[in-house]
Amino acid sequence: MRAGERALECGCASRWPALSCRARKGTREQQQERAERAVRSETKRYSTALDRCSLCFASTARRSELTLSVAQHVYMALPAKGRLVAGHCVLAPVEHAPSFRDVDDHVFEELKNYKKCLIRMFEAQVSRVGARGLGREGWG
């Protein structure tokens, strides 16, 4: 007898079609084994994604020679594949995060502090460069 036939036999499929009965799920051991396989598969998928992430600090895909500065939760690096403008750099969390929206508050505060310090540094450079009469081409 197949699992579907057992479900019909017990009547659960006819009364509650969205629910499945034990006959369809298998034994507790089989359910636990499937759950463990799913966890192993998810862990392997996640670790592969981390290894391939070019911004993860611990990733083998990240080029460490491009790192300029490392703080406790955020680091600054040159972009690995070209730059958008002169002076372009990348601020990324040390721990893997798909977006800065997904990081903890203390990481986001450190990012804001990094940005504030960079803005102050570039403002000071512009005022010194402007006094000497150099244009934007002096930045690159």
Image (cartoon, grey):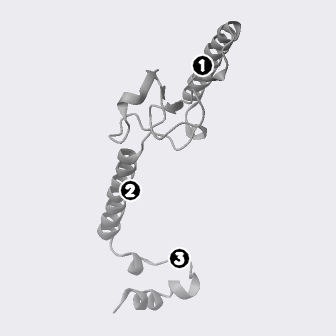
Q: Nearer the viewer, mark 2 or mark 3?
A: 2
- Please name the residue that numbered disc 1 is placed on: 138
- In the image, which is nearer the foreground, mark 3 or mark 1? 1
Task: Report the number of numbered marks.
Answer: 3
Q: Position of residue 67 (x, y in %)?
A: 42, 27
Q: Earlier in the sequence, mark 3 or mark 1?
A: 3
Alpha-carbon span between mark 2 and mark 3: 25 Å
Query: Residue at the location (60% across, 19% down)?
Result: 138
Q: Is residue 129 above or below residue 78?
A: above
- Element type at mark 3: loop
Mark 3 lies on residue:
19
Residue type, mark 2 in image: Glu
Mark 3 residue type: Leu
Three-letter code for the amino acid on which mark 1 is drawn: Gly
**Residue 42 shows which numbered tag?**
2
**Foreground residue among 33 and 8:** 33
